[in-house]
């Protein structure tokens, strides 16, 4: 079974609308974890990036870094975090 991912996507620079749609499943990096989100937030930095495009991005893109959930994959260089652990990032 292939894995799926859903994200709140903005399609173009300074696009004020988010569209919840299927997005590519992330590739696990050696120093990273993949989290199945239970909750996510859009904070002031996210909407400022969306509205003012002061950070160069490739579009379509998914904004946001505030998440809580369960770890589903752990990179080989990650220490102290395990699959199944609940996390806040």
Image (cartoon, grey):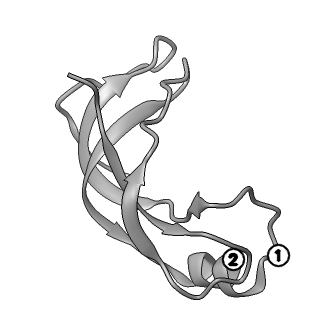
Q: Closer to the camera, 87 or 73?
A: 73
Q: Closer to the camera, 10 or 76?
A: 10
- Where is residue 64? Give x, y as percent: 51, 64
Q: Which mark is residue 49?
A: 2
Quadrant in the rendering for residue 39: bottom left
For the residue labelled by badge 1, is the local secondary structure a helix, a strand or a loop?
A: loop
Residue 77 placement, left or right of 82: right
- Around disc 2, counting alpha carbons within 10 Å, would you say few (fewer than 14), some (14 to 19), or many (20 or more)? some
User: Relative to 82, is 86 above or below?
Assistant: below
Residue pictured at 32% horizontal, 41% vertical? 35
- State how far apart marks 2 and 1 are (Cα): 6 Å
Residue pictured at 42% horizontal, 19% vertical? 79
Residue 16 placement, left or right of 79: right
Quadrant housing the N terminus: top left
- Where is residue 82? Give x, y as percent: 26, 24
Q: Are marks 2 and 1 in contact (CB under 8 Å)?
A: yes
Residue 2 placement, left or right of 49: left
The residue identified by callout 1 is: 54
Q: Closer to the camera, 27 or 11?
A: 11
For the residue labelled by badge 2, is the local secondary structure a helix, a strand or a loop?
A: helix
Residue 56 visible from this viewpoint: yes
Which is nearer the N-term, disc 2 or disc 1? 2
- Where is residue 22? Give x, y as percent: 37, 53
User: Relative to 18, is 57 above or below?
Assistant: above
- Around disc 1, counting alpha carbons within 10 Å, would you say few (fewer than 14), some (14 to 19), or many (20 or more)? few
Q: Which mark is residue 11?
A: none
User: Relative to 71, is 28 above or below?
Assistant: above
Residue 53 placement, left or right of 33: right
User: Relative to 64, is 45 above or below?
Assistant: below
Residue pictured at 46% horizontal, 11% vertical? 76
Quadrant in the rendering for residue 59: bottom right
Residue pictured at 51% horizontal, 14% vertical? 77
């Amino acid at each position: 079974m292939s894995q799926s991912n859903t994200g709140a996507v903005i399609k173009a620079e300074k696009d004020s609308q988010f569209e919840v749609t299927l997005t590519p499943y992330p590739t696990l990096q050696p120093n990273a974890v993949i989290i199945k989100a239970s909750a996510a937030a859009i904070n002031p930095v996210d909407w400022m990036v969306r509205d003012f495009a002061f950070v160069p991005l490739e579009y379509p893109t998914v904004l946001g870094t505030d998440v809580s959930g369960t770890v589903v994959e752990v990179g080989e260089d990650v220490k102290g975090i395990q699959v199944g652990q609940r996390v806040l990032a």
